[in-house]
Image (cartoon, coloured by chain):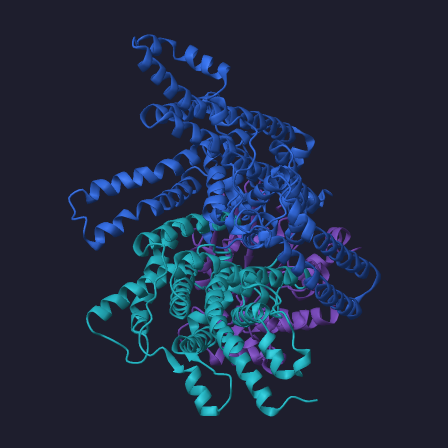
Amino acid sequence: MYLVGEDMTGGYGGADIIKDCTIGVDKGEIAVIVGPNGAGKSTAMKAMLGMLAIRKGRVTLGGKDITALTPQARVGEGIAFVPQTGNVFTTMSVQENLEMGAFLRRDDISGTMGQVFELFPILKEKRRQHAGELSGGQRQQVAVGRALMTQPSVLMLDEPTAGVSPIVMDELFDRILEVRDTGLAVLMVEQNARQALEIADRGYVLVGGVNWREGTGEELLADPQVRQSFLGG
Amino acid sequence: MLPETTDILNALVLMSNFVFVPALAYGSQLALGALGVTLVFGILRFANFSHGDLMAMGTTIVILLTWVLQANGVSAGPLPTALIALVPAIVVTAIIAIGIDRSVFSFYRKRRVAPVVLVIASVGVMFMLSATVRVIMGTDNRSFTDGERFIIRAREFREMTGLDEGLAIQTTQALSLVVAIVTMIALFAFLRRSRTGKAMRAFSDNEDLALLSGINPDRVVLVTWILAAALATIAGALYGLDKSFKPFTYFQLLLPIFAAAIVGGIGQPIGAVVGGYIVAFSEVMMTYAYKRFIAYLVPEQWEPDGLVQLLGTDYKFAISFIILVVVLLIRPTGIFRGAVIK
Amino acid sequence: MTDTTVTGAAGVATRKSANADEAPVHAIVERRQSPLRAPLAFVFMGGALVATGYFQSPAVALTILNMSLVSAIMAMGLNLQWGYAGLFNAGVMAFTALGGVTAVLVAHPPVWEALQVGGRGLALSLLIVLAIVATIAFLVSATRGRTRSFLIFVTVIVGYALLRPVFGSAVGAIESVDPAATGFIGGFGLPITLSWIAAGFVAAAVAWIIGKVALGLRTDYLAIATLGIAEIVIAILKNEDWLARGVKNVTGLPRPVPYEIDLQQQAWFIELVERVYQNRLAGITDAAAREQALRQLVVDGSGYFVDIAYAGLFTVVLLVLLALCVRALNSPWGRMMRAIRDNEEAASAMGKNVTKRHLEVFILGSAMIGIAGAMMTTLDGQFTPGTYNPLRFTFLVWVMVIVGGSGNNLGAVLGGFLVWFCWVQAEPAGAWIIAQVTADMDPGTELYRHLQDIAAPFRLFVMGFVLLLFLRFAPRGILPEKVRHS
C-alpha cells in the first residue's frame, strides 16, 4: 500500500491511546477509519501525519520511511490534511485560502486552482468572499480545496461531515469519490460510519485503540457484529 | 436669527485649526503605533508592553542620525532632516527588535507558554529599552525639528481670506498625515498582495492551518518584527517631530495605542487605523474649549460664560480609557471583529 | 507537558489556555527543596541590611528596611492576584496612590473654611452623581435596546449639565481658600493608622468596579484596563486640587509615632540613650565634652527611634497580613483559586464560578496594595501625586513577585525586601561605576556631564535584566510555590 502506519503505539503524555494499530491506504482508493467515541480514530490519523509522536511502529509513504518527519515535512512529501475544525482561514477570501494551500509550490498554480473550481463550482462563484462568511458545507469544500492545492498524493480528512446536513454530506462524499478517481489515496476518519463505509474501498474499525475489524466497505457493512455495534442493527 | 456666513466660516476655521488638523496628525501617529501593536498581537499573540519604548528607541536613533546629518550639512530643504534619517533608523531599530525577539521572546514562543508570560517578558524589555533610551538621551525634552516650520501661517491665512480666525498648518502635522497614509498604503498592499504578507495574515488567522500549509513560522515572526520596528520608528519620529521628544511620554502613549488597537479589533490592521483616528479625535474634541466656537454661531446674549470644555487636557488618558471600557462592555471584539479574543 | 513539547517541536499543536501551556510559571514540577532555603534567604537579606547599616549608615539601613516592609505588603497583594489566580494587574500604582490619598483624607485636620464655602456644593455634586448612577441603574434594569442606550445617553448629558456648574463653583471656592497653605477640603483629623484600614476599603471599592468590567476577558485586557485606570487615578490626584492639593502636595501629615524634636526633650528618652551608650559616654572624662556627645547621641538616637517605631508598626501589619494570606492559601478557597489558575476550563466545567473567584481575589489583593500605599504615605509624612510613576510603583512590584516566587507568600515578602534593596542600592552602584569610568575625563566635556546623568536609569536597566533572567532561568522565583498533595 502507498501510505501505511504499521504497529503504531502512542498517546499524549500519559497512557497510550493507540496500541499496535495498523492503517493503510493505496492510491486510487478511499480508506475509512470508524469506531466508537474515544477509540483513537483521530489519534491514529494524527500519528500518520506526525502530529503525535509514536513510541513504537513506523509510517511509510511509497516505501519511504517518514516516521521521523515533522508534519510540515510530510506535507512537503505529498500528504494533505483537512482538520476537523479550524480548517479554513476565515478572514481570507476563498481564493486566498486556495493560494495558501499552495504556499510551498513555486510553479504556476492556476491549473490546480482551475481543477479545484471544476470540482467545487460554488467556490469559483464565491472566490472573492471571505471563507468565514460561507455556510458549513461550503467551508468544508474550501478546506478540501485548500488541501488539494498542494497536488498531494494522499488526502487525509478528519471527520469532514461533522455538523453538516445529510444532503451536504452526500454531496461532499460524491466529491471525495471524484477526488479518488483522479488517483489520490484518500484516508478519512468518520462518525457517520454507514455512509462512509458505503463509499469506502477499505475500512478499519478501531475499538479501544486497536484494530478490531478490517475489510472492504461492503464486507464491513455486511458483517453482523459491525452492524450490531455501530450501524444500529 | 441665523449667524452670518463669515461667522460660520470663522467657526469652521477655528475648529480646523484647533481640532481637525491636530487630531488628524495625532491620529496618524496613533494609528501607526496601533498597527505595530496589532501586528505583534495578531502574529505573536501577546500585548507587547514594550512597544511604546520601542517607539522611543526608534526615535532616539532617528535623532542621533539627524544630528550626524546636520553636522555634515545635509538637509532635506524645507522638510525636517529627520525624514532622511528615518530609513537607516528603521534598519537599526529592526535589528534591535529582532535581537530582542531572539534573546527574549523566542524562548517562550518555542515552549508555547501562556501569552501572559510573554506580557511579563515584554515588561522586562520595556524596563531595559526605557533605561537605554534615557541613558542616551537624558530625560528632558528634546526638539529635533528643522526646516520650514509652517505650510500655512495663521497670519498669512487671515490676510489671504480676510477672516478673523487664522489657520496654521505645521509642516510636521502635514508630514504626519502624508507619511502615515503612504506607510499604511504600503503596508496594506504588502499584506493583501505579497506572498509573505498573505502568509502573515494566514498565520494570524489560523496558526495550525498555516503551519500545515507549509508557512514558515520563523520567517513570519521575523517579518512581523521588521514591520513592527518600522511602524514604531515612523510613529515615534512623527510624534517627536510634532510635539517633542521626551522618553516618558512614549510610555504614556501605550494606553491610547492599546485603546486604538482594541477599539478597531485587535489583530486587525484596518481596525488599528480607524481606532487610531477615533481615539485621537475623541481626545482632542473632548478636551477642546468650545467657547469661541459657540460665540461665532449664537447671538451675543447667549454666549457661554465658561470655557465649554468637557474635560481638562490633563484627563486625556481618561478618554482612551473610557473608549476602551465602552468597547469592552459593548463589543469586546472591536469594530472590525478582532480574531483572537476569548 | 510531554505532549506539548513533542507536538511543539513538530510545530503543530493547538494553542489553548490549558494548564500545560502555563508550565514555565505555574507548573507543578516536583523538585526536592531544602527546608532551610527560606530561613537562609531571610538571614542573608538581614545580613545585607546590617552591612548597609555598618558600611553606609544606620539611617540608610533603617530607611531601606521600612520601605522594604511596605514593598513586601505590596508584593503580597500582587502575589494574591498573580500568584494565586494568574491575574495581570498593571495598575498597582493606582491602588498605592488611592491608599495615599486615603491617608490624607482620614488624618489631615479638616479645613473648616473650605468646607464652609464649598462643602454644600460638594455635597450637592455628590447627590447629583448618585442620582445619575441610580437613574442609569434603573434604566439598565427597566429598559431595553436602543431606548435604553438613548435614555442613558440623555441621563449622562443632563446630569453632566447639572453637575458642572455646581461642582465647578464649589471647587473654585475651595481652591481659593488660602491656596498657598490649604486650598483643599482637608480630612477627618482621625489617627493616621485608621487610614490604613480605610485605604483597604477604598482600594477594594475601586477594584470591584474595575474587576466588574475587565475580569472574564483575556488576561491581557485586564492588564491594559488596569494600566489605564492607574493613569487616570494619578491624573485625578494631580489635578483635583480641592481633594488633596494635587501637585502642590500635602505635607506634614500627623504621625503614628513621636516626633524627633519631642523625643529629644523627654527625660526618659535621654536616660534611655544614656543607658544604651553607657560605655562610650563613660570613656569621656571632660563633663562639657560628655554633655556635647550625649546631645549628639540623643539627636541621632531620636531619628533611629522613630524609624524603629515605624518598623515595629509595619512589621505587625506585615505579619498579620502574612498570616491571613497563608491561611487563605491553605483554605478550601485557596485550593479552589489554584485549581482555577492551573486549569480554568476544567474548574469552570466543574461548576466553579471562575469570574466571581477572580473578582474576590482581585479585590483582596488590591486592598492590600491600598493598605501599603497608606502606610507609605504615613512613612513619608506627605502625599506627593507627582512622584507616582508606573515603572517604580507598578512594574517594580512585579519584579518583586517574580523574583521572590509567585504563588509563595514568603517569596513575595522576600522579593519585596530584596528588590527594594537592589533598587535603592543600584543608584549609588551605578554612580560608582560611572565615577570609575569618568575618573580620568575632563569634567568640562559634554560627554562627562552626560555620563553623570546615567546613574539613575542604570537601575531601570538592572531591574529589567533581573526580571528577564528570573523569568527565563528561575521562573518560579527564589522561594518557589510549595507543591501540596491533596
Q: Where residue B282 appears, x then y in whole percent?
A: 58, 69
- C63 sits to left or right of C238: left
- A228 sits to left or right of C186: right
- Residue C71 is at least partly visible in this image: yes
Q: Nearer the viewer, residue B80 or B181?
A: B80
Q: Where residue B39 appears, x then y in whole percent?
A: 48, 64
Task: Name the residue: 52% across, 80% down.
Answer: B16
Is B221 located above or below residue C373 in the figure? below
Q: Chain B hue?
A: cyan
Task: Name the residue: 44% across, 24% down.
Answer: C304
Locate residue A25: give its quadrant. Answer: bottom right
Locate residue A10: give its quadrant. Answer: top right
Is C85 located above or below residue B164 in the figure? above
Q: Where residue C429 appears, x then y in whole percent?
A: 31, 37
Label count reads 0
Is C75 located above or below residue C275 in the figure? below
- C62 sits to left or right of B204: left
Q: Nearer the viewer, residue A114 or B254?
A: B254
Q: Which chain is purple?
A: A
Q: Nearer the viewer, residue A220 or C165?
A: C165
Q: Which chain is blue?
A: C
- Residue A121 is at least partly visible in this image: no
The C terminus of chain C lies in quadrant:
top right
Q: Where residue A204 appears, x then y in whole percent?
A: 63, 54
Q: Nearer the viewer, residue C428 or C4?
A: C428
